[in-house]
Amino acid sequence: MLTAPVLELDDVAVHLGGKRRWFRPSIPSVKAVGGVSLAVQAGEILGIVGESGCGKTTLGRAILGLQRETRGTIRLDGKVVSGQAPREARRLRRAVQYVHQDPGAALDPWWSVGHTLEEGLVITDGAKRAERRPRVEAALAAVGLEPSAGRRYPHEFSGGQLRRIGLARILILDPRIVILDEPTSGLDMSVQATVLNLLLEIRARRDLTYLFISHDLSVVRRLCDRVAVMYLGRIVEIAPATRTFGRPLHPYTRALLAAAPRLEPGGLKPVPIRGEPPSAARIPQGCLFAGRCPYVEPACIAEEQVLAPAEDGHEVACRRWREIEDGAPPTRDLAA
Ligand SMILES: Nc1ncnc2c1ncn2[C@@H]1O[C@H](COP(=O)(O)OP(=O)(O)O)[C@@H](O)[C@H]1O
Ligand SMILES: [Mg+2]
């Protein structure tokens, strides 16, 4: 692509917790994100998928500037915005906003919706009173709510309407990149569909870039241009969505798709994986997925597997992807 990326991550890692203690064993930190490199184009919808605990939210919070990165560089429009103290980090990254998975829980029950929206304006750009009201109404209109919604309180709204309010709350701040963290989880299918359509409509109208975090692969398939698959804090495969779903290469991606209830992976023989990912406090040597991979070989454990181009725009962190695609038999029976 010819355009410069709007967001670039270069080997971003986030280690959480951990403590060094005198005369006692230290508490290891959790390597929630372990070195992610990524370039996101303006206007793109990038899906980030992976099992619960693989580091999706932590990655989002690091991009947002809420969670300080342990190492690595983050660039917005080519400008380095990482390596700052939290307050400065958030200031530099105002163009990035985050929609909480449960916007209802993030709203103050005692405040009218209009009050909450206005407060956001005051905090982030000190907007004057006279200009706030029209901006609140415009944000409500953008998500399909009447101006009167501003006078009502959170408990008066349905789940779907609360998602709209959650969106209005960030749209009023005029973001360029929106991180949507499981934006449709817990919604009925029909409401889910209207929320997704609204997201698409808003993106087209406002020229937004979305990072779409979800474990619902059918939704990711419908919405995303590209998909990054995370495992244990790393991206193990990234590709255009049509490729991720049509020709997944990493054994982990294949297993994820095979396990997804509402997908029929075309011609893929489902390869079940068992067990759970190891703890992010004890990252294994070599390939992160080796412990659960049906195709593991000693060499997979000996060397770290990093993302490498498989075909144009498609990268995978598996040394055996070609053999597996050509029908290499499993090296062990995980059903045993
Ligand atoms: N504040 C924290 N302190 C220590 N570990 C954490 C903290 N928050 C999350 N983790 C751990 O970091 C890893 C990634 O979590 P998270 O980013 O929430 O994953 P996801 O959003 O993909 O479910 C998990 O192992 C989780 O237990
Ligand atoms: Mg999460």
Image (cartoon, rainbow, N blue to C red):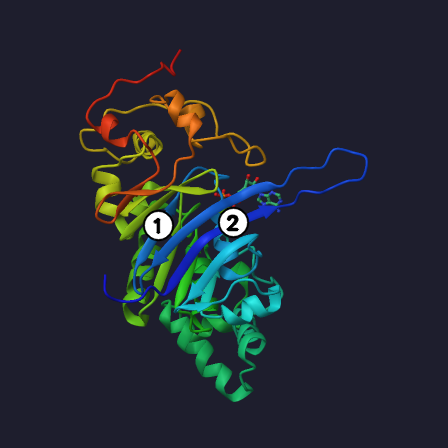
Q: Which residue is mark 1?
A: 47
Q: Closer to the camera, 38 or 187?
A: 38
Q: CA distance from mark 1 to mark 2?
A: 19 Å
Specify few, some or many for label 2: CA neighbours under 10 Å numbering under 14, 14-19, or 20 or more: many
Q: Secondary structure at mark 1?
A: strand
Q: Nearer the viewer, mark 1 or mark 2?
A: 2
- CB of mark 2 near ligand 1 (< 8 Å): no
Q: Residue furthest bottom?
A: 130
**Identity of the residue drawn at 51% across and 88% down:** 130
Query: In the rendering, which numbered label is found on residue 13?
Result: 2
> In the image, 219: left or right of 289?
left
- Quadrant occupied by the N terminus: bottom left
Between discs 1 and 2, the one toward the N terminus: 2
| Tag 1 and tag 2, C-beta contact below 8 Å | no
* Residue 123, x across and y down, in percent: 58, 75
Q: Closer to the camera, 226 or 13?
A: 13
